[in-house]
Amino acid sequence: MDITFHLNGEEVTLSGVSPTATLLDWLREDRLMTGTKEGCNEGDCGACSVMVTDDRGSKALNACLLFMPQLNGKSIRTVEGVSSPDGTLHPVQQAMITHHGSQCGFCTPGFVMSMVTAHKNGATDHDVQLAGNLCRCTGYAPIIRAAEAVEDQPVPTWITEEPQLREPVPTAQNHSPYAPRSSDELAAIYEKTPQAVLVAGATDVALWVTKGLRDLEDVIFLDGCTDLKQVEITDDEVWFGAMVDMNTMRDAIAPLHPSYGEMIRRYASQQVRAAATVGGNIANGSPIGDNPPALIALGATLHLRQGGNRRSLPLEDFFVDYGKQDRQPGEFVEAVSFARQEDTLRCYKLSKRFDQDISAVLGAFNVTTKDGVVTEARIAFGGMAATPKRASHVEAALVGQPWTRETISAAQAEFDKDFTPMTDMRASDLYRLESARNLLARYYAELNGETVSVLEVVL
Amino acid sequence: MSKTNSGPVAKPLPHDAAKLHVTGTARYVDDIPVPAGCLHLAFGVSTIAKGQITSMNLDAVRASDGVVMVMAAQDLPFTNDVSPSIHDEPLLSDGSVHYVGQPLFLVVANSHRAARVAARKGKIEYAEETPILTVDQALQADSRFEDGPRIYQKGDAAAVIDAAARTVEGEMELGGQEHFYLEGQAALTLPQEGGDMLVTSSTQHPTEIQHKVAEAIGLPMHAVRVEIRRMGGGFGGKESQGNALAVSCAVAARATGKPCKMRYDRDDDMVITGKRHDFRISYRAGFGDDGVLQGVEFTHLVRCGWAQDLSLPVADRAMLHSDNAYSIPAIRIESHRLKTNTQSATAYRGFGGPQGMVGIERVMDHIAHDLGLDPVKVRQANYYDAPPSGGSAPQGISDKKKDNTTPYGMEVSDFELHGMTERLLESSDYEARRAEIAEWNKGQDHLKRGIGFSPVKFGISFTLTHLNQAGALVHVYQDGSIHLNHGGTEMGQGLFQKVAQVAASRFGVGMDLVKITATDTAKVPNTSATAASSGSDLNGMAVKAACDTIRDRMAEFLAQRHQCDVGSVRFESGQIYVGEDVLTFEEAASQCYQGRISLSATGFYKTPKVEWDRIKGQGRPFFYFAYGASVTEVVVDQLTGENRILRSDILHDAGASLNPDLDIGQVEGGYVQGAGWLTTEELVWDGKGRLSTHAPSTYKIPACSDRPDEFNVELWSGENREDSIYRSKAVGEPPFMLGISTYLALSHAVSQFGDAYPALDAPATAEQLWSAIRRVRDGV
């Protein structure tokens, strides 16, 4: 594949790029630019963070999870390209020195890139911006001091003025890797090559390469399908195209369902959310992907497309069994949608660490009452079964009953019928089952206005 | 003797490499440009925990793309051993398999990825045996290092406890910890003429790398040179665990004649290398109604893994910190060093000290709970006495003089914690907050807050006495620039800057004249690991000695030349005052050169006063103690066990700090790392001995938002009572143990849900806390 992009302001054109070469390896091994570090090679430590800019703006991404073809037409800035051409340090760099934000220095380039990106975007929610950057030395406090110190400083011109992007080199459509420019093109290609791997944000597929050491044969990069990046919110419906990234989804959903927005804040990290997509998260069928339970609780509909044929189904029906989804060869997720509704949704994510951790249990509760009686209950869990799954018995125990502690207690007993969770390194079966039960009590308490989360406690 | 002023010492200068860090130009091993033809290495590792290899078919490995060579144990030219202690750790399996992840064969290929891909293609057959994974299994099989348990004691603890007015007893599991240095293990070798080897290794212990490489390629140590400019974090994990990579690279470079590089992928790093020792600690304590401890018994079951590595001194240090800050009239500590089919546990910041300290802090917490007393009061009542002069007055409940010797017979003569505790309780507003928390908790169903206080008294020196030595090499060039080298290694702690501040101060010059250079076994030989918090203490003193030698030679020459008394020569602010004349340092260096004065010197230092018999458990293993104290407040949710740190206040004793800002950095970072150990950092092995938590996706070190919302850190303004470098104190490990206050705060919060003692295990994950709350609330 031939690609063109800007690297620290200079145009780079490469031909015959392997579809699964990562930006991190290319920078370090081919370009001998070793400022960008490999800490984990799986997108969890952020040491390889770079800033990627396109017509949708600038974002920090993990270079270890970026395949080179994904860069086509974009501008990349690495730590080597953050100081001014004359060597003047970026304010973030100077503040990191002044506030002792580095000790061993190995995570520092990644922190600098996340901070430079946040600074450029005017973001001051530092804990959120930096949740995807691990530091083992400093305890983070001095890094946050540095981030706070530059909040009011102007963005340097050499950062604001990325060179004009040329139109990306058109990509041949007749051999892999494919880079369709619309969902129609995608549908046509995928129908002909159903064995191909679809790469949306690559936050999952990249691990097949970096950790599984697989070489992928046929690959279709979806980033060019801009018509799949639409978010539509009407009076009746909320619609997310499959290629909507998770940060965009968070921004869209937070005003409608704040608890869902807060859950997405804790979903992976800023870098991973900037790459990960709504469709990818559903299509890979993870039993603990955090979106599906929340969407199921909202009564979401999944929209699939195969060639010219489209079909829709309730999202919960998509997940057939562990690793098995109701998706035909050549069929892809086009969108997910749900009806506008009163916000009674609460999403509870239990994990060892609050930020950037895979859930042990993700419970999504959406109970509607009228005149004190439950009229509808949609409760779905991740991490409790082989697939994201509704708690049907619990729901049944609620519907038609008065919305009281007694009803909650009775419904809590029903969890055993819905779930037989497993024990793994994240949690025991007992903890999963009992805390799931408790989350129903938390839901009731929260709707009653009680303080239920340690995250709400501020001294 | 010539004189200098204090110069840059005690100034809060940034890390010497800070600008290189933030611009991505600081070079780590994997960043060094390599000559063309550099080969890359990876290990094929075992998939079972215990057994014998019955066949090893490596045909597919050899046939894999890019593979140059594959080596198994029989292909190694000389010694097959990478152990730092008793030669029980083959580089490549000799046919026996001892843990999942043990290196079996070595792949040499033309790229890092080609080596990794090939390493998975080995077809190994095993005669599998039942592994010993847990401390119970090890005890039952009597699988241990040393003949039996090591026992240190003072008085007749059993009798004292039996006779005491009150007793508590309990048992706790205390998990291990992955170092998670951000830079994985790495090494690079460049073969030299005549078979010599130049090694660059991400190691805290260059001399050990030199020693093991020399053994492995059958040459004297003089044929091997090891260099390291910096590591991307160490925390003890690079004290011995880098041996396997450096030796592999050397052996492969010897065989191929090409440069060889090896770095572990993160998952390999976590599966192959050792971690902090996990402990099961059981205790029985006798005390009076006033909370004063009369006697305590501890049993430590230490899971050491498959090879001895540094487990004996780690387990010893745990015993040596079983008193922490408390005068204990009668104590018995029994320590079992158990051999299991898991990674060989190794050095980790605190080196067993944290585990020992958690034991006694758990006892203090339990006593306070039993008596319904404020745990701070109980602790103060049990503190060692302050030294007779110069220190703050004892604050104990009891006024009578305590026995101020440790269980191992060392007099505690520098105890700072009375004054530090008073000051911290005041600055953190402890009492008012404790009352406010109690009030707040009454109004909450689901959430409870808790507050915990813990002191630290940490012994400084290597317990293996001969390691307490260091060397330095200093050159002054004729243009006045200074080349500084010593045996310490830089892993982020700021050692190089602190030592450079010493050097600049000795010459009375600015920092710009001092060049900090990479640690190099060819410049300073026979160094100890940069470990045991000793870096600045030992190397600072050695550098001071070297600088003073040169300075005195310069002074003598200049005094003679300028016809004045040598005692009146002053090195100050970049100038040298010689009688009526004033020279710049550059001019002086030039004159000395022309006067044929040697401007190069070595320096050497050995710690005075230390002597230690680890079998008897008697002596003075430590030159001095470093102190600290912390107050942490948390909130816990009973429905899920979710919890957070809300506020932490710390007062830490760095003596007369060489660099207060760098020291505060160690304190902040150490605290968060310690809190991580006791909360979210959970290592999980499955029933077959496979580590399930082998990447940051499953092993959770603290993230940004896990630091305390409010985080107040101060240094105690004292100075070392012993004659250390500028009266400073070591600061690498001690702050790690400040994190224990997090565990205690969580225990306090859990205790708000019921009457029973929380008896928390660690790490106190959300699930642990949820489980503990059920126990205290429902008796489940």
Image (cartoon, coloured by chain):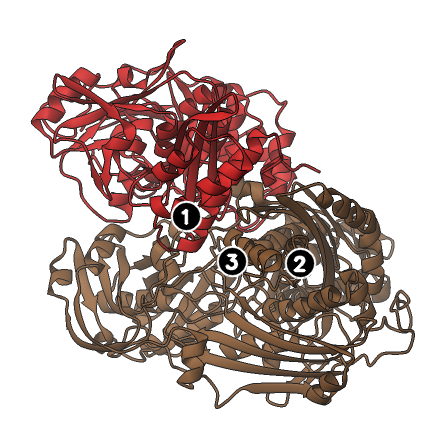
| Residue at image location 50% in from the left, 51% down from the top | B701
- In this view of the protein, which residue sits in the foreground, B149 or B531? B149
Name the residue type under label 2. Leu
Q: Is residue A116 left or right of residue A329?
A: right
Residue B264 visible in the picture: no
For label 3, the residue is: B518
Q: Residues within 10 Å of mark 2 (few under 14, many from 20)?
A: many
Up-down relation of residue A274 to residue B186 (above or below) = above
Of labels 3 and 1, the one closer to you: 1
Q: Is residue A301 left or right of residue A366?
A: left
Of labels 2 and 3, the one closer to you: 2
Name the residue type under label 1. Gly
Q: CA distance from mark 2 to mark 3?
A: 41 Å
Per the image, label 1 sits on a secondary structure element best described as: loop
Per the image, label 3 sits on a secondary structure element best described as: loop
Q: Residues within 10 Å of mark 3 (few under 14, many from 20)?
A: many
The image shows residue A257 at horizontal and vertical percentages of: 48, 23
**Quadrant of residue B687 within the rendered picture:** bottom left
The single residue placed furthest to the top in the displayed view is A235
For label 2, the residue is: B744
The image shows residue A331 at horizontal and vertical percentages of: 16, 27
For label 1, the residue is: A39
Name the residue type under label 3. Ala
Q: Is residue B314 left or right of residue B292?
A: left
Chain letter tied to red: A
Q: Chain of mark 2?
A: B
